[in-house]
Image: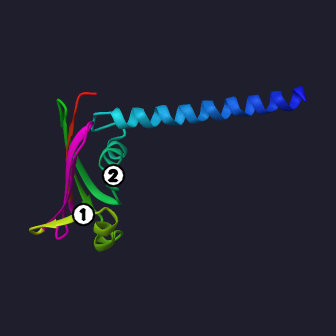
Amino acid sequence: MKKVFLVVTVLFTIFAAFYGAIHLFGRYIYNTQSCELFNIDNIELRTGVNIPEITSSDCDCHNNHKEAKFIINKQEVDLENYVSKNNFRLVHDLYVKENDNENSTYRVTLNKQTAELIINLTYKSN
């Protein structure tokens, strides 16, 4: 009985440590405010918008603000499906998704004609 208890305790400890490490890594990515390290992952976590296959990107970070521009690979990505899956709304000729929450404010804009995806993300003090 002691062996079973010991095995269960060790397995539970390993699982808890693994879960904790994954959670801490996710928080690290979420709190990263740079254009280099985990840029796309940070944007996806903050905005809930998937960044698909791209052909080019540009990013500028200063203070608590990030502006990132991506050109979506129209050969690989169905833009109609992309707009639908990411809950964009049509505003004039652009597709927009925006939100203001306790951690950040963002505006994601997609121009379907040029396949340009622009993210303006402002980090609030945590």
Question: In the current view of this chain or complex, which residue is farthest to the right?
Answer: 1
- Residue that extends furthest to the left in the rendered view of this protein: 92
| Numbered tag placed on residue 88 in the rendering | 1
Compared across the picture, whether 83 is left or right of 2 comes to left
Q: Is residue 90 above or below residue 49?
A: below
Name the spot of residue 17 as percent of width and height, x first: 61, 30
Q: Which residue is mark 2?
A: 48
Q: Quadrant of the N terminus?
A: top right
Task: Give the magenta range.
Answer: 94-116
Asked whether residue 18 is drawn in magenta, I would say no
Relative depth, front residue between 46 and 115: 46
Where residue 118 sits: x, y (%)?
19, 53
Question: Residue 121's quadrant in the figure?
Answer: top left
Kind of residue at badge 2: Gly
Q: Residue at x 37, y 45 (%)?
A: 41
For the C terminus, the image quarter is top left
3 with respect to 44 (left or right): right
Rendering coords of residue 89 (x, y %): 20, 65
Tally the numbered discs: 2
Circle 1: residue type: Phe
Mark 1, Cα crowd under 10 Å, few <14 / some 14-19 / many 20+, is: some
Relative to 4, 108 lies left or right: left
Q: Residue at x 36, y 69 (%)?
A: 76
Query: What kind of element bears circle 2?
Result: loop
Element at label 1: loop
Q: Position of residue 48 (x, y in %)?
A: 33, 52
Q: Residue at x 36, y 45 (%)?
A: 45
The residue located at (37%, 40%) in the rendering is: 38
Along the line of sight, which residue is nearer the eye, 40 or 23? 23
Comes first in the chain, label 2 or label 1: 2
